[in-house]
Image: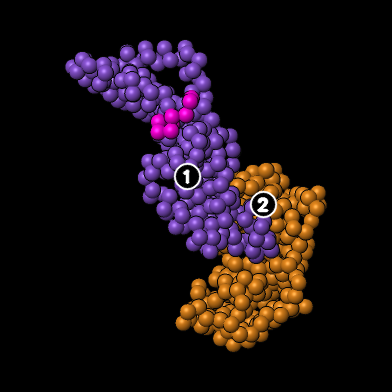
Amino acid sequence: MPILCNQLSLSFKDLAVFDNFSLEIPDRHVTAVLGPSGCGKTTLLNLISGLLSPALGSVSGIGNERISYLFQEPRLLPWKSVRKNIELVLGPFMQPKEASLRCSKFLEMVGLSRFTDYYPHELSGGMRQRAAVARAFAYPAGVMLMDEPFQALDLHLKLSLIELFEKLWNHDRRTAVFVTHDIQEALLLGDTIVVLYGPPAEIQAAIPNPVPREQRSLKEHAILELEQQLYFLLA
Amino acid sequence: MMGSTLPNKGSQNRTVLRFRNLFISGAAVLFLLAIWWTAALLMDAAIILPPPPAVVRELLGLLQSNDFWMSVWSTIIRGFAGFFISLSIGTVVGIAAGISLPLHALFKPLIAIIRTTPIMSVILIALLWFKTGTVPIFSSFLIAFPVITQNIIVGIRQTDQKLLQMGRAYGLDSARRLLHISIPSVVPYLISGSQTALGLTWKVVVAAEVLSLPNLGVGSEMQLSQMSLETAQVFAWTAVAILLSAGSQWLLSLGIHSISWSRLYADSM
């Protein structure tokens, strides 16, 4: 079922961040939301997840679906090992044995099986974000919200994490909303790219990615053309 | 090459610095002793200021008596009782007041009043209410408990909002968020609060013993020595009180270091 944002309105003090805003997020697709800082991208994720409630309007299509989250920072608890960090979010609805197996499986998929008992401060920034990716996918959820999760990483790490995300996502296709201000990230990950400006947030364009996921690369002709188009929309 | 020599040089520097600082501290102790000794010689009145050897002699004499150990032991029991009651009640009240604004409003005036009450008033009032042996425990509890509570309230308030938001986003209920996110965040604040509280505890326990004169106790002995003008003995008992406080601080720091993850806060992310 797609997620529908129906005529959302929300203000912070006197600033209207959303005013009668509607968006349809297709099922089992990655929707990239591209826009400048402060246009309401993070607020949109908080409205979808229910961390914030709109003053008017509603979000439908989530029902009782669980939501996993990837933040800009890894947000791992510094006093728990990588394994315990993941088992913590699985705990409420899984037997310890099952949680432990699931945790091992996903840590292996992100290449951290040798580091399961390490504490976050003992890992590099890239490894910490990989642990956060493992937590997001290990958490059984139908919806995945991503708030610029690759933004703080250098280009090489960013590309390897995007590749990792694709691998895990192909294994378990979730309805994903990926918020970013980076055109290239949006081009590589988004099946649809929604360009926002604001506040109040408005959709400037919603462009389907012409290249199938497996063939996307920053050297692909169609991708480069779309990059130009997005660049003009944002500049 | 640089990489291999730098850390080595660093650790060498650290050792040198440590020795230098030890040397300075040692020199300062000797200097104070010298002032004390000189003043004692100049005054030539052991009843006002006994020279260091007289105090050491007195201390060695005390160590050989049975009553000495019984007194020290009684004071230790009172100190630890006061400290652990403060620690447990302070932790519970601190966590409750840290997460609930109404509870904070409820405890705030009480904590503020206790913190500003003179220690002597607490002891004098406790003398009217309790048996002599209980006065030191009650007084040290009343003085140390607000320190721990206040530290824990601050610790709960300082919990990283981003981690709490992560917990909410991943559907952790409030009990799990408290147990796994807020309470571990409090640990560094609990440690510094305990250190301050423990230092205060010994001061209050000995002061309360001086005023309440239980049968056995470092403070009682100190007071009796003072009344019989045994100045060297007052000094010797004072040294015992200082050693008690220092020893317990050392035990506490050992305890803190045995919790491996508390060290993680040195470099939190």
Q: What residue type is labelled 1?
A: Leu
Q: Nearer the viewer, residue B96 or A191?
A: B96
* Chain assigned purple: B
Q: Which chain carries label 1?
A: B
Display coloring: by chain
Residue bearing mark 2:
A85
Q: Position of residue A200 (x, y in %)?
A: 52, 83
Local crowd at mark 2 within 10 Å, few (<14), some, or many (≥20)?
many
Does residue A201 sit above or below B44 in this rendering? below
- At a point 70% along the width and 67% down the height, the residue shown is A67
- At a point 55% along the width and 52% down the height, the residue shown is B93
Residues at marks 2 and 1 on the same chain: no
On the question of residue A44 being in view, the answer is yes
**Apparent side of residue A100 relative to residue B97 in the rendered image (left or right):** right
* Chain assigned orange: A
Report which quarter residue B47 is drawn in.
top left
> Dot 2: what SS?
helix
Q: Which of B141 and A22 is in front in this view?
A: B141
The residue sitting at the front extreme is B128
Q: Residue B246 carries which label?
A: none
The residue sitting at the left extreme is B42
Residue bearing mark 1:
B142
Q: Mark 2 lies on which chain?
A: A
Q: Position of residue B145 (x, y in %)?
A: 49, 45
**Cα separation between marks 2 and 1:** 39 Å
> Dot 1: what SS?
helix
2 vs 1, front mark? 1
For the image, the number of numbered tags is 2
- Looking at the rendering, the stretch of residues picked out in magenta corresponds to B209-216
